[in-house]
Amino acid sequence: MPFDDLRSFLAALDAAGQLLHITEEVKAEPDIAAAANAMGRVGEGTPALYFDNVEGFTDARIVMNTLGSWPNHAIAMGLPPSTSTREQVDEFIRRWERFPVPPIRRDDPPWRENTVDGADINVFDLLPLFRLNDGDGGFYLDKAAVVSRDPDDPDHFGKQNVGIYRIEVKGPRKLAIQPVPMHDIALHLRRAEERGEDLPIAITIGNDPIITLMASAALRYDESEYEMAGAVRESPYPIAAALLTGLDVPWGSEVVLEGVIEGRKREIEGPFGEFTGHYSGGRNLPVVRVDKVSFRTAPIFESLYLGMPWTELDYLIGPATCVPLYQQLKADFPEVRAVNAMHTHGLLLIISTSKRYGGFAKAVGVRAMTTPHGLGYVKIAIMVDEDVDPFNLPQVMWALSTKVNPAGDLVQLPSMPVMGLDPGASPAGITDKLVIDATTPVAPDTRGHYSQQVRDLPETAAWTAKITAMLSAQ
């Protein structure tokens, strides 16, 4: 049964024992973020956190870590909580191939219950804001789905983007947003500014898990996140028209902020503790003016902690990055078996592939760096053979240990693009990229001595499944 809103997802987490209610009074800072930070240190299988007794707030409901473990991620997809990471990615791929599934429009979304307009808006009163890291330059909305349209082709449904971008609260009606140049909203804004216009947007907070996953995915420019959400949830995704902008927004959102990114206006934003595990500095970024806020009665505010991996962000964007990269590479190279983009939003990839001829794996690695996601993120690609599971890090380390000869297995690409938040970039946005070929050489590349590799016994797979089932039954 797909989830149409955040509340139904929370109920499912609760029923599975994956929602921890924090009943004691906590401080907004540092307790909420620190508790979410701790989830990445406690171990695997951690629950979501629900806070409703926050010092200084009279009526706040805050959830963290909703997608912060593989059991929670599985529940979001309607799978058993015990589903393995690799099985979840494989199921993601199977559903992905059903794209597109057209959305369904519904009347009377719950977020229309309350509205505030114009000068009456004060987001400090409407939202329970808190800092995520002690060095952050302000309050951030970091799990909101932002909707925008291509100003040059506003009626093209697929070019309407739903993405997650960091947003700093700058004033009662003023926000700052980071449109990374590789992302669709940056293209929308550039086209609006070329026309001398502001860019209308809708910022939706407290969403169902599937649209959050899709807003984090590296789709092609004209692929609709709503149509992909329908494929992944195996049911048409419900949407409704935002009251002021007319943008299509999730039907089940808790809060919808509407307004514009003001054309050619920039202000200092930051710093912010980013997914790279480093703070980003202050930079001139576009400014958002909020003109209308709509919200459910007693709304639930959702945020996520990000900082030194692993955090919820890594669970959120890991599979959603693996699958489109796999699909895009597979289209050009059918030999590709699997793609692991779990590590720091795909700044490092591990790709499993068979080879047609010598040098083939290196070519696949270079191609990964020119995909829509790879242009801005993929900095290092590790290539492994088809019999190496890229999600099994001991196997990957074995391949690196025994298959790599630096004399011929490293391909360095100088002065390539990378997202500006990469702390290793110099200058910001430029880096050398590296392909590490940890595959077995094939003709005409005849280096090394790999003819006598030890293989698993034929009966090993059956015994693996048998013992796994026995352990699960204990």
Image (cartoon, helix red, strand yellow):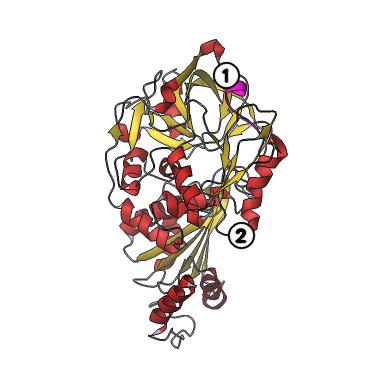
Is residue 443 positioned above or below 8 on the image?
below
Return the x and y of residue 419 as percentages of the image width and height: 54, 44
> Taking the image as drawn, is residue 222 in sight?
no
x 67%, y 31%: residue: 138
**Disc 2 element:** loop
Return the x and y of residue 183 as percentages of the image width and height: 46, 38
User: Which range of residues does the magenta coloring cover?
Assistant: 123-137
Q: Main secondary structure of the magenta part?
A: loop
Q: Nearer the viewer, residue 443 or 125?
A: 125
The image quadrant of residue 457 is: bottom left
Do the numbered discs 2 and 1 sit on residues whose CB atoms are within 8 Å?
A: no
Q: Residues within 10 Å of mark 2 (few under 14, many from 20)?
A: few
x 47%, y 66%: residue: 390
Is residue 170 positioned above or below 397 on the image?
above
Q: Nearer the viewer, residue 71 or 290?
A: 71
Q: Residue furthest top?
A: 119
Give the number of callouts.
2
**Disc 1 element:** loop
In the image, is residue 247 part of the stretch drawn in magenta? Answer: no
Is residue 91 positioned above or below 403 on the image?
above
Q: Which mark is residue 30?
A: none
Q: Nearer the viewer, residue 333 or 341?
A: 341
The type of residue carrying mark 2 is: Gly
Q: Which mark is residue 173?
A: 1
Q: Residues within 10 Å of mark 1 (few under 14, many from 20)?
A: many
The type of residue carrying mark 1 is: Arg
- Say left or right for 55 vs 315: right
In the image, is residue 132 part of the stretch drawn in magenta? Answer: yes
> Taking the image as drawn, is residue 235 in sight?
yes
Q: Which mark is residue 43?
A: 2
